[in-house]
Image (tube, grey):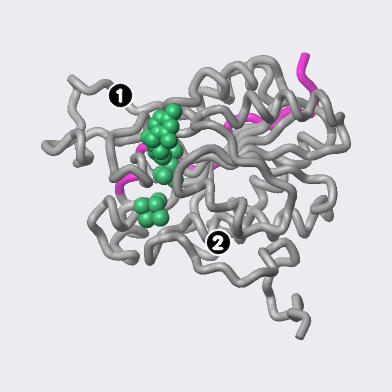
Amino acid sequence: MEKEWSTGTPRLWARIPVPLAFCPGCQHGTAIRALCEVIDDLGIEDNTVLIVGIGCSAMAFILTNVDSMMVAHGRPCDVASAMKRILGKDTIIITWQGDGDSIAIGCEPTIHAAARGEKITTFMLNNSNFGTTGGQLAPTTIMGQVTTTTPYGRNHDHGYPIEASEFLGNLRGVAYSARGAFTSPANYQKTKKYMKRALEKQIDGVGYSFVEILTTCPSNWHLSPKESLRRIEEELIPQFPLGEFKNVDKIE
Ligand SMILES: Cc1ncc(C[n+]2csc(CCOP(=O)(O)OP(=O)(O)O)c2C)c(N)n1
Ligand code: SF4
């Protein structure tokens, strides 16, 4: 029987039954659901292309019923820039990336796509470590955080975390930059609003748009799903405040 979308499942959600690839309590699935809902709301599913890098976050391409491409680790913004230029303004190009993919190995592609003001949108899932490969230090690892490569906690010798939303918001080619989280229903709705605004900037052809989303990684944090949510509230949000950092309708 045809699935009833009125039950609350986003239209864009994959129509083939696939086992969820994520660990219990991981919020990557929540983020993908939010993406599906936003694309549904905007009615852009037929002209959207999703470009994923490498990492747990990349599983988005299996769970969404949208044209997609998986590219080399860190390279989504390069491929997205080329695609947008070839396919033109009517194709909505989204890169869906982990923090490692986006601002560790993919730092240069991301910064230069932003600086060039490419009319693409990046959604970056910040779980403060490299999830897939076992929880190593990432540019988003906070001070004091224990990871497999900082077993005594990140300290001053390891350098300092990158606040990607604030940093990218300072670049001229960026039309929109925001950071959200899914720690409560209210935050879920707010983050969806940020995601929608970012895509609207692309639809309006203003410039590069970016939304960072704080997500849980219970397996590598060695916390329960509930404790992981508390960690985002108590430890990550104070370091990575939620909100909009740039929102312009025209780049001068
Ligand atoms: C060129 C290259 N370098 C390293 C790797 C190994 N690798 C695969 S996933 C990954 C980390 C992904 O972390 P992140 O982007 O934060 O995503 P998450 O898994 O946390 O969603 C790494 C280093 C790779 N696949 N390709
Ligand atoms: S390792 Fe972390 S990011 Fe990857 S699926 Fe598990 S909880 Fe999610």
Residue 192 spot, x, y in % from top left:
64, 53
The part of the image, by quadrant, that contains residue 51 is top right
Q: Is mark 2 within 8 Å of ligand 2?
A: no
Q: In whole angstroms, how far apart are the C-alphas of marks 1 and 2? A: 30 Å
Segment tinted magenta in the rendering: 235-252
The part of the image, by quadrant, that contains residue 204 is top right
Residue labelled with disc 2: 186
Question: Dot 2: within a 10 Å radius of its alpha carbon, few (fewer than 14), some, or many (20 or more) residues?
Answer: few
**Viewer-side label of 1, 2:** 1
Q: Amino acid at mark 1?
A: Tyr
* Circle 2 SS class: helix
Q: Is residue 16 left or right of residue 136?
A: right
Residue labelled with disc 1: 160
Task: State which tag comes first along the sequence, 1 or 2.
Answer: 1
Q: Is residue 141 visible?
A: yes
Residue 183 spot, x, y in % from top left:
45, 59
What residue do we see at 82% from left, 50% from top? Answer: 44
Instruction: Tell whether position 44 is magenta.
Output: no
Q: Is residue 216 visible?
A: no
